[in-house]
Image: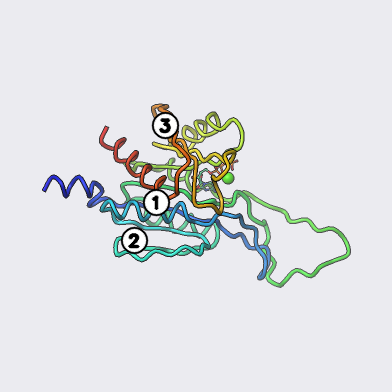
């Protein structure tokens, strides 16, 4: 019996995961987006479900798919839709892992007809989106909150600052400097940083393995 419990350490736990990019509409046929594939978040959802958790996966536009009776996938498009969906679930969750590459800015005005080209140059005014992760950090009670940090310089310093300012329990630093890490590839080079400033550097691994390591790191912190 202890064996089964060891293998399903997240049995009875609810885990929220965000994945993928967001698309911010410019007009009915155009948007601002990014190259996130959603793969990291989908792997995290799978790893959590494999450990026994009930998972809600909120994903922006992604070609990834999962079929698991422990995972409920909710598809959204924009940062605002992701924000609203995440907030519907957060209070019922034990763990939230926000791996989505949420757009930082969106067009201030969305044209309701296709914008025609003109002879002159063209400027789109952007405004900030809501920071979903920070908004959860501000209201969290006993949820274990995990964020990602995508950095290209002063990585540790920037990641630690995000951990503090967003009130996280753990942050996953994603190094874009290393070859084979980041968007569109199936490997990732990450470093886990805990609330107590422990820095746990990982090798270049498949996103499946990174997801597995992350879940085990979370379980370790929860049991500490
Ligand atoms: N995030 C979010 N909502 C946003 C922007 C970011 O939930 N509007 C989350 C991401 O899912 C990630 C974390 O915040 O878990 C950090 O994202 P990142 O882009 O690295 O940091 P930012 O805080 O957006 O700062 P910057 O892009 O300027 O580095
Ligand atoms: Ca950002």
207 left or right, relative to 105: left
Quadrant in which the C terminus appears: top left
Task: Give the residue displayed 47% in from the left and 45% down from the top.
Answer: 133
Q: Nearer the viewer, residue 47 or 118?
A: 47
> What element does badge 3 sit on?
strand
Residue 71, numbered label:
2
Which residue is labeled 3 in the image?
Answer: 200
Q: Which corner quadrant of the figure contains ligand 1?
A: top right
Which residue is labeled 1 in the image?
Answer: 44
Q: Is mark 2 in CB contact (under 8 Å) with mark 3?
A: no
Task: Give the residue displayed 47% in from the left and 49% down from the top.
Answer: 99
> What element does badge 1 sit on?
helix
> What element does badge 2 sit on?
strand
Q: Is mark 1 in CB contact (under 8 Å) with mark 3?
A: no
Q: Nearer the viewer, residue 171 or 7?
A: 7
Q: Is mark 1 in CB contact (under 8 Å) with mark 2?
A: no
Residue 6 location, x and y as percent? 20, 45
Q: Is residue 193 above or below residue 59?
A: above
Residue 82 location, x and y as percent? 49, 57
Circle 3 crowding by C-alpha within 10 Å: few under 14, some 14–19, many from 20: few
Residue 69 location, x and y as percent? 29, 65
Residue at mark 1 to residue at mark 3: CA–CA distance: 18 Å
Residue at mark 1 to residue at mark 2: CA–CA distance: 11 Å
> Is the distance from the Cβ of mark 2 to the nearest ligand 1 atom less than 8 Å?
no
Residue sticking out furthest to the right: 119
Q: Please identify the quarter of the rendering in which residue 170 is found.
A: top left
Q: Nearer the viewer, mark 2 or mark 3?
A: 3
Residue sticking out furthest to the bottom: 113
């Amino acid at each position: 019996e202890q064996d089964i419990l060891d293998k399903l350490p997240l049995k009875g736990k609810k885990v929220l995961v965000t994945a993928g990019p967001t698309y911010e509409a410019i007009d009915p046929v155009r948007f601002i987006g990014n190259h996130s594939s959603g793969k990291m978040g989908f792997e995290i959802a799978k790893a959590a479900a494999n450990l026994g958790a009930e998972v809600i996966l909120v994903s922006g536009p992604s070609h990834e798919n999962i079929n698991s009776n422990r995972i409920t996938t909710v598809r959204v498009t924009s940062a605002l839709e992701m924000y609203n969906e995440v907030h519907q679930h957060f209070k019922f969750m034990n763990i939230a892992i926000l791996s989505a590459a949420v757009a930082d800015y969106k067009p201030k005005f969305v044209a309701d007809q296709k914008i025609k080209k003109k002879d002159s140059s063209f400027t789109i005014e952007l405004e900030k989106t809501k920071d979903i992760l920070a908004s959860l950090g501000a209201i969290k009670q006993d949820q274990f909150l995990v964020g990602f940090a995508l950095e290209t310089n002063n990585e540790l310093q920037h990641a630690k600052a995000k951990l503090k300012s967003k009130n996280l329990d753990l942050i996953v630093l994603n190094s874009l400097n290393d070859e084979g890490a980041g968007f569109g590839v199936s490997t990732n080079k990450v470093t886990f940083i805990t609330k107590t400033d422990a820095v746990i550097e990982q090798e270049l691994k498949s996103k499946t393995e990174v997801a597995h390591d992350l879940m085990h790191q979370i379980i370790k912190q929860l049991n500490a």
